Amino acid sequence: MTTTIVLQQAINGVVFGSLYVLVALGLTLIYGVLVQINFAHADFVTLGAFAAYFFMHLIGAGYILSIGVAFLVGGALGWLINASIFTPLRRRGNELLPLIATIGVSVMMQNLMLTWFGPIPYAFETQYSSQVIRFAGIFVSWQNIIIIAVSSVTIALLYAFMKFTFLGKALRAVSQDRETAGLMGINPNYLIMLTFVIASALAGMAGAMLAPVLVLTPFAGTSVIVKAFAIVIIGGFGNVEGTILAGLIVGLIESYTTQFLDPGLIDIVVFALLLLMLAIKPTGLIAERREENV
Amino acid sequence: MTVTFRDLIAGVAAVGLLAASQATYAQDKTIKIGALFPMSGPGSYFGAQDKQGVELALEQLNKAGVNGYKFVVQYEDSSCAPLPATQAAKRLIEQFKPDVIIGEECSDATLAVMPIVEQSKVPLLNAGSSSIKVTEPGNPWTFRIMPNEVMQGVNLAENAYKRMNARNAVLLFENTNAGIGNAQVFKENFTRLGGKVLAEIGFGRDVNDFTAIATRIAGLGKIDVIPTYTLEGQGLKITQALAQAGITKGGGGDAIQIGTIWLPFGFEQKAGKAALGYIRIVQFDPTDTRDVVKDFITTFKAKYNADPTHLNAHAYDQIMLIADVVKRGGKDPQSIRDGLAATKSYSGVTGSVEFDKTNQNTKMDTVHYMETKPDMSWTSLKWN
């Protein structure tokens, strides 16, 4: 086993881990604020992928710009669905209703996309997919460099937003104790909407970057969402830092499992880690502080 | 409430129309065909293209009918997986009561459906599943017009060793009955001839990142051929990852990807330059000069404004073969089953059909080889 291969698999793992992080961050943000799992998150990823694809192929725009478009489309759709479906259901006071509604939205979106885009896989090629840099036995495509760069910048911006801006602090306050945050003059409904928009925009962006990597069909997002759920749990439900760490760990585990064991064992290794984490440290790698609703 | 004369006339007319339509329905003789196709999930491209072939065949057949019979098809989404396929088959049999069923494409789904059709005594005509288990041991009610994994695998291994002078192979396959079965047949025959298999890499349908797999293959030394058994979506990503890693011809390497009937035409255009040199079996050769092929291509293009794929072709063949059986007297499940079993040298667009005692089509002229050229078009290799 050469150092080159070990290093190459590390690069592969970081690339896919970065994508997992982008998908999982949206899930963890929504859970952090609403204590709700969004089962439709995968479909926002898929829609973002198609938005980028059609923006590139119909308008002839560049790939980088299409990532921005997917970000905007995801955010706009998040606002629309939250305003029209989840918010009215949340007002009824039953926390189960919005949760079930996310499943309904997921099925609806998948079938709408199946009708619009058809079942045949799309080839989402960018000018960067086939441009490969080779150095000392290592290879990395420009597509993968873009994935790492855009993911890193996005994660850094999100982290700065959460840590240093008023809105970010307000979001964290709502995440820790919604009622007390409300008493402090923070409008929880506004922040819930903001959370949905940010999470959906991140999902859309992740879709645009995943599309050239995975198989683009109306079900594309579902292939990564299960891993994203695992990452959110391993990282610590609702914790941004934990999600980033867990995403990168899962990406590396996948690469090294493929290299040293067998790709057919990837899910077994990842979910064994999930079970181990639940048994040893159920709060995840980094526990999110949260007041119990009593 | 008052009933006017106009209401009365309208009512009588409605009843009359209803009665007339019932009478017409009763007089029409129909052969009911149930279609189990994957319409959702990663195999849904099969269903979409199968349906095009079926609809073209129905359009042609129902203009005049066959022996006084018209053909109707009920589609059910069997999702390329055992559970939805069995549910879809039960729905078809209980509600639609078909005379014959066509499908599924994926071996796992077909194998799951086979006991149900046998119990219900409805013939199943399959065109897309390669697992040997479909016909060995099989059952009296299941027929397959596609060459099975052994027919394809033996032929592929011999051509790889003898024509391509390949000595080292790496096997890539999805972890399904068909994927594992095809890979094993290749391995047995390639090693029997003197070839060496350097690695056997199986993966689930949920694997997205093939760069890691390509990296592993890159560390295995000199590789001549990479037999690959996947659905189209993962196939695209594998081909691109192998080229990125510099393993295959498309990426400047020496290895050549080879494969079986799983990928439709158009794969090369989607995969781009990475597909350069890919040699694979297809079930349909558009350069075939038989009239039945030329007519099929012309009518398909006229209807869909696109070139037909092997999936379009074998779905079309399934309906046309059923029509041939009806022409020979088939009219219900039992007589259609018997008619299928008695088929001798039927000439379809994919090739000839003649079933052996296991209901496997024995004709090898359904196996065509094609190679991807530098401009991403392909050339027919005429190896069979």
Image (cartoon, coloured by chain):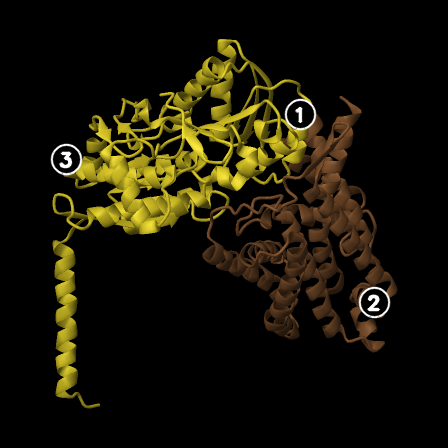
Instruction: Estimate the x, y position of residue B337 in percent, counting from the top left.
Output: 23, 34
Quarter of image, res B115: top left
| Amino acid, disc 1 | Ala
Instruction: Estimate the x, y position of residue B79 in percent, counting from the top left.
Output: 45, 45
Q: Residues within 10 Å of mark 1 (few under 14, many from 20)?
A: some
Q: Secondary structure at mark 2?
A: helix
Give the residue at mark 1: B218
Q: Is residue B4 left or right of residue A221?
A: left
- The reply to whether callout 1 and callout 3 are in contact (CB within 8 Å) is no
Q: Is residue B142 left or right of residue B346?
A: right
Say above or below: A84 vs A102.
below
Say above or below: B260 vs B32.
above
Q: Nearer the viewer, residue B315 or B309?
A: B309
Say above or below: A67 vs B192.
below
Between the residue at mark 1 and the residue at mark 2, the CA separation in whole angstroms equals 50 Å
Between the residue at mark 1 and the residue at mark 3, the CA separation in whole angstroms equals 56 Å
Q: Which chain gets the brown colouring?
A: A
What chain is tagged by disc 1? Answer: B
Determine the residue positioned at 64% across, 49% down. Answer: A225
Instruction: Estimate the x, y position of residue A119 in percent, counting from the top left.
Output: 47, 49
Q: Secondary structure at mark 1?
A: helix
Mark number displayed over residue A235: none
Residue B102 seen in the figure: yes
Mark number displayed over residue A173: 2
Q: Nearer the viewer, residue B381 or A36?
A: B381
Comparing labels 2 and 3, the label whose residue is closer to the camera: 3
Give the residue at mark 3: B328
Please report whichever mark, 1 or 3, sits nearer to the chain's N-terminal start.
1
| Amino acid, disc 3 | Arg
Residue B33 seen in the figure: no
